[in-house]
Amino acid sequence: MRLPSQPRSSARGCFVPKQNLAFHNEFRRAFRSGAPVYNQKIQAKERPNMHSFALSYPARSDFDWCWFLRRQGKSGEAIERILHDIGVMHPDGWADWRPSVLTSTGSPVEMLFSTAQPDLQLMTEVADPASDPNGRVDEVCRIMDGYGAKLPPASLRDVISAAQGAGPLKFGAWLGLRHGKGKTHCDIIAEVPAEADDLSTLFSAHDLSSVLEAFGPKVRPKTIVFDGTTGATSILFELADATRHCLPVLADAAQVSPLILSNAIDGLTGANPGGPLPFNRLGFRFTDHGNGQLKVLKLHFSATDALGSDDEIVRRITACGGNAFNGYGALIESLPHVPARFKHHGCVGLIARQNAAPVLCAGVAAPWTSLFEPY
């Protein structure tokens, strides 16, 4: 894939800036020779250590992914080391894991982009998706502790544990990573199964009762997110049969303009102003930073449902400010061809702001292939 009006080079169909050609050629020679990515192995349960081994060259199965990361400078190299420490990547390429429900393609890593955040961001699995998901919260917390992040307080861990004990889990928990200015930031994204219907303690703490009462049984919690840097807690919900009438309810809770949100959705998706929303399910996430600050509202919806093909998604995102996404163009150039029923893009999001256009966000699966079919 490529961004609109962006040239390709003749080398493997990738856009390679002139100043990077020498490194690119060296990279490809190493790729053909089968040289390993790292010169040391690391035990899977060892405490994460970003400096536990030195970078070398990428192997075959993760060539496009490594090439993308190394075009991102020190942040990309740091992320690559972390993924090796976790076990998502091995010295000979991607870990031999079953496909993940994190992305449509089955990739265990999803890159996250935002017009307000230049740091490299992603979400990742922390274990083979085929393994028991019930221990993932503990594993994510172990990794976060290894990088000096704040951990969820005991009260929040109790809520998560009770919720996850109510029904079967699909993924348990994912790890959110952000790296910039030499620092690594971690989040935990904990799954809330559909059977978990009593989170009243958490909802009351976030004062969301009026929002939930307005939507009734059409809404349910999907994940609980804890920011290991700020200590803020977020709850992500999904609303079925979403209409424009839901926007004022959400906007009022965050004290932002529903008209600005509605116009932003229309501008991004090309929907008719005031007409039906171009998607059926709407995700919304409230983040409470405490200290009397207003809740932060983020809307998100399936890019595929709203826009269709990856090419159209790229075109619309780029036209609406996505050209400011740090690394987005390089990742799009690295994506392999996939059957039409799969999409590299996940959700697009809008973070509401007072009296200003929302912040645009998007998720894109890391370049990944597997002998297994995605779920």
Image (spheres, rainbow, N blue to C red):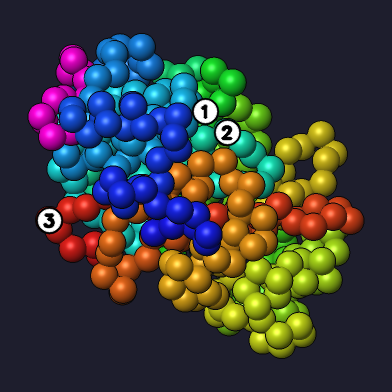
Category of crowding for the residue at label 1, using alpha-carbon neighbours closer than 10 angstroms: few (below 14), some (14–19), many (at least 20): some
Q: Mark 1 points at which residue?
A: 179
Q: Which mark is residue 119?
A: 2
Q: Relative to 347, say whether 56 is above or below.
A: above
For marks 1 and 3, the one nearer the N-term is 1
Name the residue at 57% across, 41% down.
Answer: 326
The stretch of residues the image draws in magenta is 31-42
The one nearer the camera, 302 or 126, is 302
Which quadrant: the C terminus?
bottom left
Q: Earlier in the sequence, mark 3 or mark 2?
A: 2
Q: Distance between the residues labelled 1 and 3?
A: 31 Å
* Mark 3 residue type: Leu
Where residue 39 sits in the image (x, y, percent)? 18, 15
Q: Is residue 33 magenta?
A: yes
- Left or right: 310, with 87 as reference point: right
On whether residue 1 falls in the magenta region, the answer is no
Judge whether residue 371 can be spotted in this image: yes
Magenta stretch: dominant SS? loop
Name the secondary structure under disc 2: strand
Residue situated furthest right in the rendering: 355
Left or right of residue 176, residue 271 in this image: right
Q: Can residue 137 be seen in this view?
A: no
**What's under tag 2, amino acid-wise?**
Asp
Q: In this view, does 34 lie to the left or right of 268?
A: left
Q: In this view, does 219 lie to the left or right of 308?
A: right
Q: Name the disc covering residue 371, or none.
A: 3
Task: Out of 329 and 260, give the one closest to the viewer.
Answer: 329
Q: How many numbered discs sit on the rendered protein?
A: 3
* Residue 247: percent from left, percent from top: 75, 72
- Helix, strand or loop for disc 1: strand
Cβ atoms under marks 2 and 1 closer than 8 Å: yes
Amino acid type for the residue under numbered disc 1: His
